[in-house]
Image (spheres, helix red, strand yellow):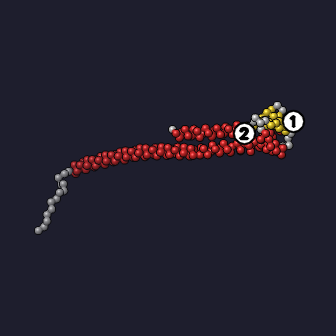
Amino acid sequence: MALKLESFEATDIPPAAESGADHAMEDARLAAFEQGYTAGWDDASNASAQDQTRIRADLARSIQALGFTFHEARTHVLKALGPLIQEMTVRLLPELAREALAPTVLETLLPLAERLAEAPIDLVLNPAARTPVESLLEQATGLPLNIVEEPLLGEGQVYLRLDGCETRIDLDAATGQLTAALRGFFGLSAQEGAK
């Protein structure tokens, strides 16, 4: 027995109606595709914006934590080094100033010596500073010097007098100012750390 199948072809529908239904269906499919595409794009944009906001917030928290950690580390280092540097300043600077006094006097004296005729230069200094200053000036210049010892002057203070002009060298004041500046710096750093 032969199998007979039923035909589902639309033979009754005119070709013009068939084409209108296809266009309507295609338009509906395109509209659905556009709607789905737009919804997907909007979802992706929203997700990207949320990710950007989260990343910015995480980055801001990390930078803030790093800044706080750096500030803490700096404060601890300054607290640890402060007493050492201040002690070095108190012990070493005066010695360095004493060693630098004679070369500083020479450096100050040489421009003045160019204006000098035969008049001696008056050097007013502390008796403890006389030997190093006098020996260096005699070796380096051979200028006539009139050395006046003044015990009230600090060991880092010298006055040069020539033809009514006076020049003051005060390494004691420079040392004191540097020491005070370091104490002030470490004092401020300690106050910042306490905040």
Could you say where residue 34 lies in the image, as x and y percent from the top left?
A: 32, 47
Assign a secondary structure to mark 2.
helix
The residues bearing labels 1 and 2 have C-alpha atoms spaced at a distance of: 26 Å
User: Which image quarter: residue 162?
Assistant: top right
Q: Can I make out residue 93 in this image?
A: yes
Assign a secondary structure to mark 1.
loop
Instruction: Using the image, determine if residue 13 lies above or below residue 108.
Output: below
Q: Can I make out residue 45 in this image?
A: no
Residue located at (57% from left, 44% from top)? 78
Residue toward you, 126 or 173: 126
Residue located at (84% from left, 32% from top)? 163
For mark 2, what is the residue?
171
User: Which image quarter: residue 74?
Assistant: top right
Q: Is residue 31 left or right of residue 87?
A: left
Residue toward you, 177 or 41: 177
Could you say where residue 51 lies in the image, as x and y percent from the top left?
A: 40, 46
Q: Which mark is residue 119?
A: 1
